[in-house]
Image (cartoon, coloured by chain):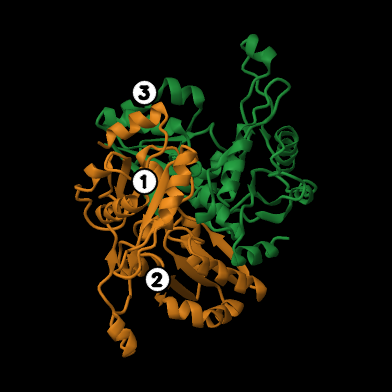
Chain colours: A orange, B green
């Protein structure tokens, strides 16, 4: 039978493709990969549109019970739903290759991701360098290699898309030690927090690529009705209230004339 | 009323999202942007699923009659369909800003593009540098700046996605001079042609980044049922028959262990 790996896109239950929806209708088991990303919608909404019960596959299930999920796919059609596109995270590719190794037929149904939906701000997708991730700094862990990647992109005149950290289902050290399955409230990095951290690294590395005057674009909830895009200097954007998650940030490289015009719209 | 800009995704009529399909159903006029890309399906199939007549908006219409299309959107819901995602080409962003300037409400409905669907080969999307386009060489026009971008990406250990040229609705010089609207048959660059051109530039620039031993991945018809992925050296891939369009090519940068394993699948 077929294992369908289906991207859900960015916002809510209606961002699935017609092909994806038709596939789900055929499936006996429908899993939602629930830890590498978040949907801005309740699982109930998905279940209603799909007319299917959805099983949340958390990190533990994806890592320890992958073979069990695949057992089903040997005998019946099974769907694994992933927010965004299917192969945003390595875990999914691992799952995919396990299926191939067991000679299970796999069909991948792609969808949009933030990596291309950021084109909503008008900067050309062909003028971006490597995408980076900015993690939450903690007291003891303040990595800064992402900064060097911005430096590299800038040296080629390229824009840098910065994806901002998400912490869901995190346990406090106390709860972790006591093996209590009590989770901290989810945290989503804001554009403002990202800029603060960038300034901190700039202070240390002094390459002048994340200064208060650096041009940037902040984006929130891309692709939803409440999408917000703001262009400006980092010091300007640091003061903007972008509202609820998810946020991302673009450090602007060399601008073409048309790109300059487009960014004016979002000032 | 609303102007909907709707991405159609990669393959056929069923790759539209449920949200996109619902939007089309509300529209009085449905345009299909027909020149920057190609669908692997006839317009009739789209019309059947959407239950709407589709007007092909060719280059001329998009550039000269944009305001006319927008006139409709002032009074009724109008959809502009774009293969892939909405803002793959600058033309579409221009159209979008014209609408904003006329205070027309615009809703963008994103979809997948080759830029992220290439993740089907197992290379991490976060390890790509700038995407490049390889144009068909002619007798008199053999640009090679794309080569320098591969060099740049490689210097950061990054993979390079090479999009390959498409020539549709091209006129011969004779027909152009005589103003005859007779078009040449469409041409789509193959992985093999791209590699030949890369070798030619390598010969000239000698940076050893596109040699016969360079690791690469060739992809054809990504996201369709006949998708073909092959990894190997450039000299190996040059001999592979990838079949019909569209093709693309990835010049591989530094590989992580998992990426190495994944590429083994496609040997």
Residue B12 percent coordinates (x, y):
55, 48
Q: Which numbered disc, 3 or 2, marks the residue closer to the eye?
A: 2
Q: Is residue B185 above or below residue B157?
A: above
**How many other residues sit within 10 Å of disc 1, few (<14), some (14-19) or many (≥20)?**
many
Q: Is residue A71 above or below residue A225?
A: below
Q: Is residue B246 left or right of residue A265?
A: right
Q: Quadrant of residue B244?
A: top right
Q: How many marks?
A: 3
Residue A250 circle label: 1
Mark 3 element type: helix
Find the residue positioned furthest to the top. B178
Residue at 34% across / 32% down in the picture?
Answer: A262
Give the letter of the chain under mark 1: A
Per the model, the C-alpha gap separating discs 1 and 3 is 34 Å
Give the letter of the chain under mark 2: A
Mark 2 element type: loop
Q: Quadrant of residue B44?
A: top right
Q: Which numbered disc, 1 or 3, marks the residue closer to the eye?
A: 1
Mark 1 element type: strand
The residue identified by callout 3 is B68
The residue identified by callout 2 is A35
- Residue placed most toward the observer, A213 or A4: A213
Residue at 36% across / 66% down in the picture?
Answer: A46
Per the model, the C-alpha gap separating discs 3 and 2 is 47 Å
């Amino acid at each position: 039978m077929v294992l369908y790996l289906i991207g859900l896109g960015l916002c809510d239950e209606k961002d699935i493709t017609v092909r994806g929806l038709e596939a789900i209708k055929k499936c006996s088991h429908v899993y939602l990969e629930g830890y590498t990303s978040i949907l801005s919608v309740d699982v109930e909404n998905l279940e209603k549109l799909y007319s299917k019960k959805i099983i949340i596959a958390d990190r533990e299930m994806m890592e320890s019970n992958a073979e069990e999920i695949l057992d089903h796919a040997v005998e019946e059609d099974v769907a694994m739903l992933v927010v965004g596109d299917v192969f945003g995270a390595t875990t999914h590719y691992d799952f995919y290759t396990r299926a191939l190794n067991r000679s299970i037929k796999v069909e991948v149904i792609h969808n949009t991701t933030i990596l291309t939906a950021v084109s909503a701000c008008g900067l050309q997708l062909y003028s971006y360098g490597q995408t980076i991730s900015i993690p939450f700094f903690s007291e003891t862990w303040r990595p800064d290699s992402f900064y060097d990647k911005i430096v590299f992109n800038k040296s080629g005149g390229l824009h840098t898309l910065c994806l901002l950290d998400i912490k869901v289902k995190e346990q406090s050290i106390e709860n972790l030690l006591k093996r209590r399955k009590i989770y901290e409230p989810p945290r989503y990095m804001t554009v403002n927090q990202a800029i603060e951290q960038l300034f901190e690294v700039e202070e240390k590395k002094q390459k002048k690529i994340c200064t208060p005057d650096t041009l940037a674009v902040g984006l929130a909830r891309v692709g939803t009705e409440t999408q917000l895009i703001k262009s400006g200097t980092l010091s300007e954007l640091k003061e903007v209230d972008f509202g609820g998650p998810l946020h991302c940030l673009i450090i602007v490289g060399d601008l073409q004339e048309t790109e300059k015009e487009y960014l004016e719209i979002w000032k």
